[in-house]
Image (cartoon, rainbow, N blue to C red):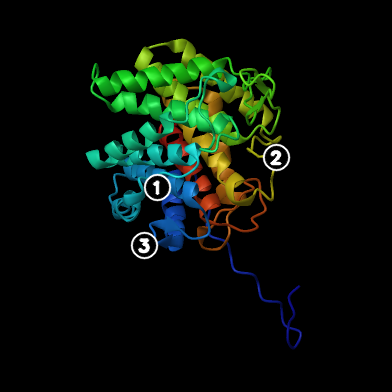
Amino acid sequence: MFSSCGGGSPAAPPAPPAPSGGNFLQDASLGISTLQGWYDQSTGLWQTTGWWNAANSITVLGIYSKLSGSSQYLPTISNTFNVNESGGFLNNYYDDEGWWALAWIEAYDVTGQTSYLNMAEQIFSDMTTGWDATTCGGGIWWNKTHTYKNAIANELFLSVAANLALRAPSGSQQYTTDLNWAQMEWNWFAQSGMINSQNLINDGLTINTTDPSSCQNNRETVWSYNQGVILGGLTALAKLTQNPSLLQKAQTIALAAIANLTDSNGILHDSCEPNCGADGVQFKGIFTRNLAVLNASLPNAQYDTFLQTNAGAIWNDDRGPNDQFGQVWSGPYITANAASQTSAIDTFLAAYPVSANAP
């Protein structure tokens, strides 16, 4: 409530920034400017969010650089690499490693610097040590203490392997090795049971303690990012193998996710909202990023509408001060951090090619 002195009219609240009008690349640019306010030059990471989330922020900077033609953020990518390369971007979690491998593949694409691609290959080499054919018949573990076999680690394994093969010289040993891993991963994942009868992917597998080779879908949460990473992985594998059925499978998953994870206005949600913690706040942008990858190979008007609708909702309904973006895209804006900011930027960048090509 506003109070007034001497019976005058109450002061009007400041006017919000003007809507973008669908200029999603500009929206992304404004969002990145805010994101960089959290960047810590000394650590190469972003304050307010974690290690694996930072890999996604690097990926976003790479995509923005590619779409905009700007080199403004290449020093950030380089700094993060230089500050952290001594540790090889490895830790106890294979999914964390997968995010960093994808980040350096993106950095390689935008810069052509082979040091980035080499790092991605080294990370992937470590990920392969997580493969275990005894438990659940294959797939990699989520962590190096072998406590869980889940969707995200294996989807990332597929995507990294396929994307590395795409960038290796055709016919080379590296190409053959990466392609074989990608095919072996998908053959296992497709029959693992994690893709349920609704064509949605649950979180992971329950291991039968009396027969570890026997595993079942654990029926746990259908997270948006698990419906997303698989799209990028299958699209890359389809390019390698010229197998259109892989794109069709990706489309089936994508359409199921759009049908089941959106509200009546077509806005994407995760079930944890509005309190998704440090991890879940990142998930939806990963879905939109990978949907854009699929859409570039197998265009679908439904994807066009979905991406533009969600990007527009973020800008109009979930924007806070200084172009900060929260986790509930349908609004209202509550708060933001570097993870929610990156997720929103991902969506602007995914919507931009669609809007730029619209009649």
Determine which quarter of the picture holds residue 226. Answer: top right
**Residue 41: numbered disc:** 3
Residue drawn at 32 percent across, 24 percent down: 166
Q: Residues within 10 Å of mark 3 (few under 14, many from 20)?
A: few
Determine which quarter of the picture holds residue 142. Answer: top right
Q: Position of residue 122 (x, y in %)?
A: 33, 36
Q: Nearer the viewer, residue 174 or 309?
A: 174
Q: Residues within 10 Å of mark 2 (few under 14, many from 20)?
A: few
Q: Position of residue 188 (x, y in %)?
A: 52, 17
Compared to residue 346, the image places residue 338 above or below, namely: below
Tell me the distance, in whole angstroms, between the alpha carbons under discs 1 and 2: 26 Å
- Quarter of the image with the C terminus in it: top left
Q: Position of residue 243 (x, y in %)?
A: 42, 11
Name, please, the residue furthest toward the front. Answer: 210
- Say what amino acid the circle numbered 2 marks: Ser
Label 2 with label 3: CB-CB less than 8 Å: no
Residue drawn at 48 percent across, 46 percent down: 52
Q: Nearer the viewer, mark 2 or mark 3?
A: 3
What residue does disc 1 label?
Answer: 58
